[in-house]
């Protein structure tokens, strides 16, 4: 397995910013040109081991903390098994209650409760790492679509119990739950979506 130089570039940038160092200050500390650091951080140049060792000393980390390995693509045969093959009883009960409400069904509240399952204990290690990547997305549309696919993959039995036209409502509840900190990850993008929805609701109420 090779080195993912793009991810290595991102790791250098993140650790530099965490140390509150500018690119020119890091360049001065390791004795290279500013252009070298700039190119390293966009993945336009591969660092030598000597440069990596100097950067690691300045950023107070190990070289292996900067080097990121490429992640192999899963083949059809290697496709990850879902984290949950069945639907937890409390989700089944919530969905039954929602369905009984007919046109007034509130699947968002079920999604809110469901969000507590998005944690490092209930998800497989690979699934939790994928969820971390999804939660780093900056586009609300990309985040929403990726999260829906993720929940479909990891909790197929749960999603099969939800009417297709209600899945977006359910997902909104999941996003609100993440924003509220019910899972192990509280993504900023989820908080933004929740706050924007609440702002729109307040605007509609004030217009009445």
Image: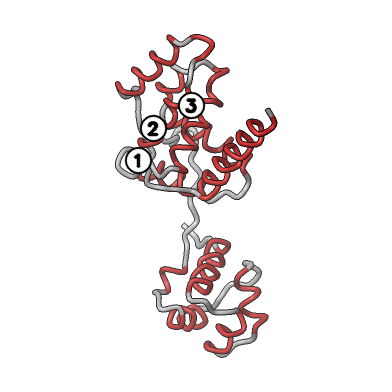
Rounded to the nearest angstrom, the CA distance separating label 1 from label 3 is 25 Å
Horizontal side, residue 36 vs residue 29: left or right: right
How is the rendered protein coloured? secondary structure
Element marked by disc 3: helix
At 40% from the left and 45% from the top, the residue drawn is 181
Q: What crowding class fits label 1: few (fewer than 14 Cα within 10 Å), some (14-19), or many (20 or more)? A: some
Among the 4 quarters of the image, the one containing residue 146:
top right
Q: Earlier in the sequence, mark 2 or mark 1?
A: 2
The residue that appears at 63% across and 72% down in the rendered structure is: 45
Q: Which residue is mark 2?
A: 81
Q: Tell me whether the residue at label 2 lies in contact with that at label 1, contact meaning CB atoms closer than 8 angstroms.
A: yes
Task: Give the foreground label among 1 and 3.
Answer: 3
Separation (CA) of disc 2 from disc 3: 26 Å
Q: Would you name the residue on which mark 1 appears?
A: 124
The residue under label 3 is 108
* Disc ID at residue 82: none
145 or 9, nearer to the observer: 145
* Image vertical order of residue 10 relative to residue 199, above or below: below
Residue 91: x and y in percent read: 36, 23
The label nearer to you, 2 versus 3, is: 3
Residue nearest the observer in this picture, 16 or 172: 172
Q: Residues within 10 Å of mark 2 (few under 14, many from 20)?
A: few
Q: CA distance from mark 2 to mark 1?
A: 9 Å
């Amino acid at each position: 397995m090779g080195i993912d130089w793009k991810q290595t570039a991102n790791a250098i940038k993140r650790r530099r910013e965490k140390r509150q160092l500018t690119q020119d200050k890091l360049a001065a500390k390791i004795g290279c040109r500013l252009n070298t650091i700039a190119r390293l951080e966009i993945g336009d140049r591969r660092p030598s081991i000597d440069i990596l060792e100097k950067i690691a000393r300045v950023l107070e980390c190990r070289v292996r903390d900067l080097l990121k390995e490429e992640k192999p693509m899963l083949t059809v045969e290697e496709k990850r098994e879902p984290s949950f093959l069945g639907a937890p009883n409390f989700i089944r009960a919530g969905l039954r209650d929602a369905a009984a409400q007919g046109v007034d069904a509130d699947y968002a509240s079920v999604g809110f409760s469901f969000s507590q399952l998005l944690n490092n204990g209930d998800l497989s290690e690979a699934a939790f790492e994928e969820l971390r990547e999804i939660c780093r997305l900056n586009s609300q549309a990309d985040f929403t679509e990726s999260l829906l696919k993720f929940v479909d993959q990891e909790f197929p039995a749960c999603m099969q119990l939800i009417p297709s036209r209600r899945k977006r409502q359910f997902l909104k509840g999941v996003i609100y739950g993440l924003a509220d900190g019910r899972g192990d990850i509280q993504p900023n993008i989820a908080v933004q979506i929740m706050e924007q929805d609440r702002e729109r609701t307040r605007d509609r109420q004030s217009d009445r």
